[in-house]
Amino acid sequence: MCNSSSITEFLLLAFADTRELQLLHFALFLGIYLAALLGNGLIITAVACDHHLHTPMYFFLVNLALLDLGGISASVLKAMDNFLSGKRTISYAGCAAQVFLVFFFYSSEISLLTVMAYDRYIAICKPLHYGTFLSSRACARMAAAAWGSGFLHAVLHTASTFSLPLGRGNALHQFFCEIPQILKLSCSDSYLREVRITTVSAFLVCGCFAFVALSYVQIFRAVLRIPSQQGRHKAFSTCLPHLAVVSLNVSTVIFAHLKPPSISSPSLDLVLAFLYLVVPPALNPLIYSMRNQELKDAVWKIKAVYIS
């Protein structure tokens, strides 16, 4: 039965009933959140302070760090508040805002990662035209397009989801407001409209991934033709971190939303959401800094300044 009364708040998933486990989950999320803040904050500060890093690649990397900070803040802060207070509730307006912000930051990040693949393709396959194709104005426009596409995507999904009549309870089996969970509460068959939009979004994500994959086919061909081992190493050091970040972000979200119903379960949905929303913002700075000597040097300079 579907109760058509209006919903004023939702109940998020309670990881545990005991106070000790709630505090343990809070500590886990807090640790990951602080790691994301520290790592992405260091990248932003390093690029801003070191003029040698004022290049298109690091400009896009700063944008990625900002999106990571926004995405993890939108998805985990409310869960952390609930773990600490022992509550499960989130207001209707708060849920709508969280859906918008999560979609905004994540969609913008997928678009930006596609732009970053284009940056690497031009840098390695067409180096003589790098300054022409990736001028300061062109980079600003591409970054604005990535953020703008994320905004439009978020508006579309949020408006479509919260225009549906919701009345099948108010419990969401997730630690944040996730659209598939909200759709389960719909009283109307019009949820098929949102399913179609989600399908289109999934194809767009797959399209971005295909563009990245094709770019890297051309990149690896060009890299293998570089005569010097040092040149190949430098090219790989700028490409492999980006490829790892794309794989981590895109593969988990594609599997989460296009997995066969036969293997779907609340526990698996929870793990996948954690993998594509919470883990990448904390891991991305580590992945990018592992093989990037320029970024490491800039970070060590910052540390030396603060220590002295």
Image (cartoon, rainbow, N blue to C red):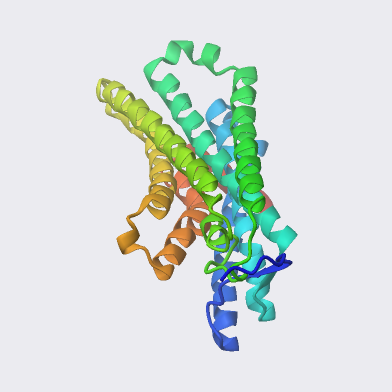
Left/right placement of residue 26 relative to residue 211 reads right
Identify the residue at the far front of this view. 1
Q: Front-most of 240 and 141? A: 141
* Residue 105 location, quadrant: top right
Residue drawn where x is 55% and y is 80% of the image = 24
Place of residue 215 in the rendered image (x, y in percent of width and height, measured from the top left): 37, 26
Give the vertical position of 221 relative to 195 (above or below): above
Residue in the foreground of this view, choosing between 13 and 133: 13
- Quadrant of the drawing holding the C terminus: bottom right
Residue shown at 41% from the left, 23% from the top: 121
Q: Position of residue 60 (x, y in %)?
A: 57, 33
Name the residue located 42 percent from the left edge and 52 percent from the top edge: 257
Numbered-mark total: 0
* Residue 104 makes an appearance in the image: yes
- Please provide percent x and percent y for residue 37: 62, 56
Q: Residue 183, how many percent across, how many down?
A: 55, 57
Image quarter hosting the N terminus: bottom right
Q: Classify 102 as above or below 154.
A: below
277 left or right of 257 in image: right
Q: Is residue 238 something one can see in this rendering?
A: no
| Residue displayed at 40% across by 49% down | 248
Front position in the image: 255 or 147: 255
Judge left or right: residue 110 versus residue 247: right
- Of residues 86 and 67, the one nearer the viewer is 86
As drawn, 179 above or below 58? below
Position above or below: 148 against 4: above
